[in-house]
Image: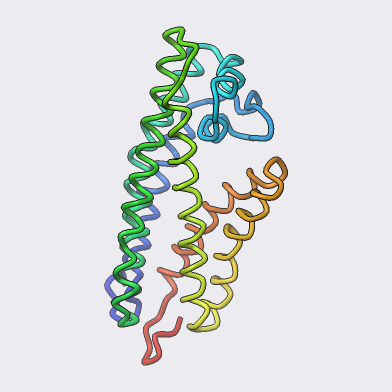
Amino acid sequence: MINNPNYPLRSLGLFILPLVVCLGLMRSVSLPNEKARPPYNSLIIALEFVHSAVDVANTLEVLSREEIMGLDRVNYFDFIFMAVYSSFLSLFIYKLGVVSNQPAVKSMAWAGLIIFTSDLLENVMMLSITSKYLDGGMSFSPYTSFLPLFTWAKWGLLAVIFAWLGTLLIQKGSLSKVLSLILFIPGILLALAIVDYFSWINRFTTSIFLGFIILLIFAVCFRKTEQYQA
């Protein structure tokens, strides 16, 4: 049962439905990801990590106008996706704090709003860049100056939050201990990406999606006992 008091986080498992729908909408747009500039394996990720007009040109000049407009459509769908995943993250943190009777944990629910805001501004910057490129623009300042700030704020904070949640879950039951170890992976890969960007950046961004899968599994399986152990 969804509202079983012994499984107080199970209702959050319902987020899998809108998350899958959003991902399906974004994947419904056919993008030639094989054209992504090295080291990226995704055009969207390549656009997120542009730092200069040269990066913009290298990312977009290999694409047709229709393909660039496809990138825009994915970003429009992403506005819905970011609202869903950040809401899930905030509610997960808040409910975990309630169940564990830890007000400090509840207060960290604001992190979802910061991540949402970063992702929102990141998308605005990317849409501004593609619009200016399609209009024949050659200079993309200030968008290329602000985009890295929002991009790294989003990805970096997600990695930090997952690692922090890992430190909380590792104190609980046996299943939680296993899941918590996986939550440390994004932080480890982030550190490796900082040291060797080209080798690790794709693995790092992919690991963030793994983090959300782990939280969904925990939400469904978490069983409340006197020790609040899963």
The spot of residue 153 in percent (x, y) is 45, 47
Kindly indicate the quadrant of the structure image that contains residue 36: top right
Q: Answer with left or right where residue 187 lies relative to residue 195.
A: left
Question: As rendered, which of 126 and 207 lies closer to the eye?
Answer: 126
Kindly indicate the quadrant of the structure image that contains residue 92: bottom left
Above or below, 169 against 56 in this view is below
Q: Please state, as top left, top right, bottom left or bottom right, where the N terminus lies in the image.
A: bottom left
The residue positioned 49% from the left and 18% from the top of the image is 68
The spot of residue 207 in percent (x, y) is 58, 53
The residue positioned 70% from the left and 40% from the top of the image is 198
Above or below, 163 against 50 in this view is below
The spot of residue 16 in percent (x, y) is 40, 54
The spot of residue 228 in percent (x, y) is 39, 85
Above or below, 84 against 71 in this view is below
The residue positioned 46% from the left and 22% from the top of the image is 70
Q: Answer with left or right where residue 109 lies relative to residue 73.
A: left
The residue lying furthest to the bottom in this view is: 226
